[in-house]
Image (tube, coloured by chain):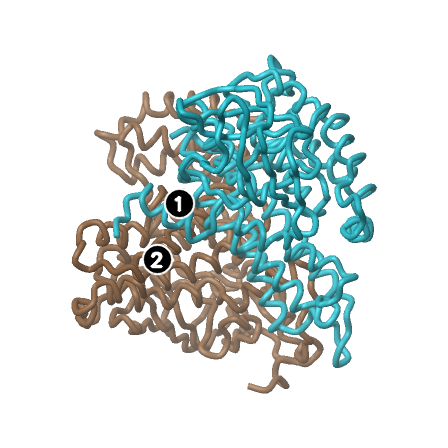
Amino acid sequence: MSSPNLVYSDVEEDLRASVRSLLADRAGPAEVLGRTETADPYDRNLWHTLAADLGAAGLMVPEAHGGHGASARETAVVLEELGRSVAPVPFLGSAVLATSALLGTGDELLPRLASGELTGALAVPLSTAPGSPFPATVRADGTLTGEVRTVADASVAEVFVVPATSADGPGLYAVDAAETTVAEVVSLDLTRRIADVTFSGATARPIVRGAAAESAVDSALTTAAGLLASEQTGLTEWALTETVTYLKGRYQFGRPVGGFQSLKHRLATLYTELVGARAAARYAADALAGGYDVPIAVAVAQARVSPIAVHATEEAIQLHGGIGMTWEHPAHLYLKRAKSDELAFGTPGRHRARLADLVELPA
Amino acid sequence: MTVTAGDLRGQVADFLATHDPKTLPRLEFLRARFDAGLAWVHFPGGLGGQDAPRALQAAVDAAFAEAGAPDNDPRRIGIGLGMAAPTILAFGTDEQRRRYLRPLWTGEEVWCQLFSEPGAGSDLAALATRAVRDGDDWVVTGQKVWTSSAHLAQWAILVTRTDPDVPKHQGMTYFLCDMTAPGVEVRPLRQITGEAEFNEVFLTEVRIPDTQRIGAVGEGWKVAQTTLMNERVAIGGVALPREGGMLGVLTKTWRERPELRTPELRDRLVRLWVEGESLRLAGDRLRQQLTAGAPGPEGSAMKVAFAELNQKLSGLELELLGEEGLRYDEWAMRRPEQVDFLGREAGYRYLRAKGNSIEGGTSEVLRNIISERVLGLPSEPRVDKDVAWKDLPR
């Protein structure tokens, strides 16, 4: 096993600073909240700046395919910041899922996704766990027919990367969004939308077939599950920081509420969990970047970090008191994201079951 | 000019060329290593080091270990190395440093720590052991507790009360105490496990020369802070392999004993496996931050998390063992030189792990430290700040 690198490099810290500054300017809590009930819940201008101008969409893509030749480590840093701001951009769907599915194929779509010129989505239900059977709801027969439910970031995708099965077996196809019917559903998570995507004889361009298609989909799900832990770490950090700030300034019984030991200890527990979450998330990102110990690193990250993000955002609601239950305070956006993330790419229980097999703890 | 790892490797090679670890007596070898500035390289010249970066010590230790050189048994002399030495270096006189550091490092003189008292554990500054000036000496009377190695130690670091009329943090003074001096009595303190890993130490009119005072009279709290900071650095310093420690004991039993398995126990085991792995990674991450010269504040959190994990794991082990868990290996009072946590049986591990959330800072105190020093939350209201020690309720 190569030696893991779990600290942030200077380059990663610079990237973080740029992304954080952009999000602070353009995706403050009031803007994000205000957008959730408009006809245009995604901020496409922000997405363009992040993806194209800052180059965040092409971090994992090699330079030969039009990307920046960085790695999952840098992508994870972007996700941490996106988690801290629950910014409404299709980074997970396009820059992580669709892009990872194409990474090993060298497909012509890669440079366009990497440059941010095109926004993509991988047509799988968001809840699909790595290691799941190849999706079977879309048939390929010259054209594509079938339905995929709860696809993340589908409503702003211009192109779909679609796993579909033909008489010859599994295949991966590229489908223009105009060829599909995208029906956005009401999502638990207000800042990452899901939609049901229907293909009715859609024109499709084959990308890869057979085992290569299976491995492309699994690799995308594995990468997304591993990197989602960084987004979840960002959610946890926001929840802790925001709650600490609030409790320092909120007076009850003649003292700042944050001075009461019962609450201090709950926050110290969250900090302790954050320390473990960050280490597990960093390990998953480094393992994905270095191509070592990936299945275990990803299973540990999802089994550990998902419940921590949910716990932190639940505590944020509780410790903000009545304010935490209101629509105008952004805490609910984070809880909704954290709980949806817990279901995304396999629940913690599913990852624990997988891990038990991987590390040989038989039933 | 900064010393590099390469320079040090060269020095070790030169040293080994003239000091053969196979023929030279152990103590002579260790003294020569100290004198060559290869003991703790970050210490000053003449005191076992050469002002090199602390991070380079690992390479020096590894080079000596590789050559089969004797080590100075740092586990047995951990309190001396980890706590007494940095304190003597920071606050001792030149004469004190020259007198104490060399035999401390070689292990010729074992050290213990006389800090905690029956009435002053987490609230260390409440301590009551009195030191009264008498000519060139101080006369010390009081009781200390939880003292590891006191029955083996030649020397102790000791904090006392020298002025009861000022608030508790101000009236303390720090000494080096000769454990063989008249009036020092060490009694084993038997614990929940049956063994006596620690001691109670009774000090009855013990005479300590003023030349063994460390720091100014009344500045004992400041000196003790240096000792305690170094204690916290020492905790969690060792890299563990995956499934190291208690988790490894449990997974081994799980794999070898299929008849013990149930789905419920498996789910709990895997949860703890995940917790253990993420804590192990957090330790790696903290060490990498230290090496990069940017230590993070994660240490206290890791101590809290480790204590909880070890308690959950050792509790689960007993449940997994079922009927066998009802037995205990032995209650006879033993006096181990160090805790044999993994070498004893499950019942011992369960009971000993209860101390993990108490020793080296209770989890409650550590959570206060995290919330106040890391998260910046308001501190507890202090009712004892401006009250003379003698007027505090106790």
**Which is in the foreground here, disc 2 or disc 1?**
2
Can residue A56 be seen here? The reply is: no
What residue sits 47% from the left and 25% below the top? A171
Label disc, if present, on residue B52 of the rendered structure? none
Numbered disc 1: what chain?
A: B
Residue drawn where x is 64% and y is 57% of the image: A335
Closer to the chain start, of discs 2 and 1, is 1
Residue A301's place in the image compared with A118, above or below, is: below
At 60% from the left edge and 60% from the top edge, which residue is drawn?
A: B370
Q: Which chain is brown?
A: B
> Which mark is on residue B267?
2
**Residue B163: image x %, image y %?**
61, 76
Considering the numbered disc 1 on the image, is that residue within a helix, a strand or a loop? Answer: helix
Label 2: how many Cα within 10 Å (few below 14, some 14–19, many 20+):
some
**Image chain in cyan:** A
| In the depicted structure, whether residue A224 falls above or below residue A86 | above
x and y, in percent, of residue A17 in the image: 73, 36
Percent x, y of residue A56: 68, 29
Write down the residue under mark 1: B105
**10 Å crowding of disc 1: few (<14), some (14-19), many (20+):** many
Q: Disc 2 is attached to a residue of which chain?
A: B
Depth order, front residue of A47/B74: A47
Tell me which residue sits at (35%, 57%) in the image: B267
Which amino acid type corresponds to the residue marked 1 in the rendered image?
Trp
